Image (cartoon, rainbow, N blue to C red):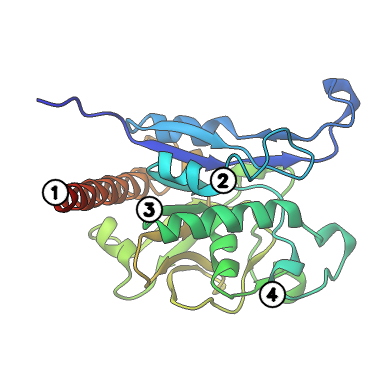
């Protein structure tokens, strides 16, 4: 019986363009991931690999290593949280300098996202990742919830950080309602000051906060694309009152297995036809 190997899940990198001197990386850019996300994936039996970005100063150029090569080697992609999506990525100018975001990271993640979609491998967006998915599909963002949607609930608190929570409500007939049978709502972490505004092409809303802010999305296209505005990797399985993140990661990994099985069958058909 052939050995079944663990799924290989790629995680987009966070970028640190200005590194504090005390870390010892003078004039260097760091690419990193947050530990909880990798552990969340690994705890469900999959391997986690950070996917580095390439720039014009890198030793390895796109001529030798391409995005498609990385995507071909992986079974799925998780877009992790971090810096704001740049307004330039959805055709706007920053309303404040501190809302300028990370345009370089946007371009890198957009490349990754579209190559996974082209190869029909699943994508899961977490917080910034959900926003990036919407922007990739032609959507826009509120640059700041408090300023652009006054009167809403708090979605970020620098002191509380991941301890800030709020209720979300599943949309009628939402796919989330199928993942969480018998539930129509949940309580989640909230660490974001931006949010989805105009929906991208094929994007459906899966859940909203009490003030109407979009908290989860899916895509109606030809492959698995899902995004949540909260951080399910911060929700401990035994955390009382918080929505268990296990159904989300398990469905994503199931989609990765299906995509892998489909690619294997397709490869077998091509091989059989050429052998004949």
Q: Position of residue 180 (x, y in %)?
A: 28, 56
**Number of numbered discs overlaid on the protein picture:** 4
In primary-sequence order, the first of circles 1 and 2 is 2
Q: Where is residue 30 in the image (x, y as percent from the top left)?
A: 74, 33
Asked which secondary structure carries label 1, the reply is helix
Q: Position of residue 216 (x, y in %)?
A: 46, 63
Residue 240 visible somewhere in the drawing: no
The disc placed on residue 121 is 3
Quadrant for the N terminus, please.
Answer: top left
The residue that mark 2 highlights is 66
Describe residue 205's horizontal placement relative to residue 140 as left or right: left
| Extreme-front residue of the structure | 276
The residue that mark 4 highlights is 151
Residue 269 visible somewhere in the drawing: yes
> Is 85 located above or below residue 72 in the figure?
below
User: Marks 4 and 3, Cα distance to the nearest angstrom?
Assistant: 39 Å
Residue at 89%, 26% in the rendered image: 26
Which residue is nearer to you in this view: 110 or 184? 110
CB under 8 Å between discs 1 and 2: no
In primary-sequence order, the first of circles 4 and 3 is 3
- Please rate how many residues cluster around mark 1, counting C-alpha atoms within 10 Å: few if below 14, some from 14 to 19, many from 20: few
CB under 8 Å between discs 4 and 2: no
- Please rate how many residues cluster around mark 4, counting C-alpha atoms within 10 Å: few if below 14, some from 14 to 19, many from 20: few
> Is 240 located above or below residue 137 in the figure?
above
The residue that mark 1 highlights is 272
């Amino acid at each position: 019986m052939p050995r079944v190997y663990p799924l290989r899940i790629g995680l987009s990198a966070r970028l640190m363009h200005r590194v504090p001197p005390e870390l010892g990386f003078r004039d260097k850019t760091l690419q990193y991931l947050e530990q909880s996300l990798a552990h969340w994936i690994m705890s469900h039996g999959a391997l986690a690999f950070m996917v580095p970005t390439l720039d014009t100063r890198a030793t390895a150029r796109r001529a030798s290593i391409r995005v498609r090569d990385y995507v071909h080697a992986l079974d799925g992609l998780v877009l992790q949280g971090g810096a704001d999506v740049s307004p330039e990525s959805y055709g706007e100018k920053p309303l404040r300098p501190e809302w300028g975001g990370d345009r370089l990271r946007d371009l890198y993640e957009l490349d990754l996202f579209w190559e996974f979609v082209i190869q029909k491998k699943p994508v899961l967006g977490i917080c910034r990742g959900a926003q990036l998915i919407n922007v990739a599909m032609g959507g826009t963002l509120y640059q700041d919830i408090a300023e652009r949607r006054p009167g809403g609930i708090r979605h970020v608190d620098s002191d509380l950080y991941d301890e800030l929570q709020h209720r979300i409500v599943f949309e009628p007939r939402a796919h989330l309602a199928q993942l969480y049978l018998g539930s129509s709502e949940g309580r989640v972490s909230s660490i974001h000051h931006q949010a989805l505004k105009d929906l991208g092409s094929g994007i459906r809303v899966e859940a909203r906060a009490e003030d109407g802010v979009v908290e989860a999305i899916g895509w109606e296209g030809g492959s698995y694309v899902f995004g949540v505005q909260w951080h399910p990797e911060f929700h401990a399985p035994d955390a009382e009152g918080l929505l268990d993140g296990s159904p989300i990661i398990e469905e994503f990994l199931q989609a990765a297995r299906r995509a892998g099985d489909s690619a294997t069958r397709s490869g077998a058909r091509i091989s059989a036809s050429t052998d004949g």
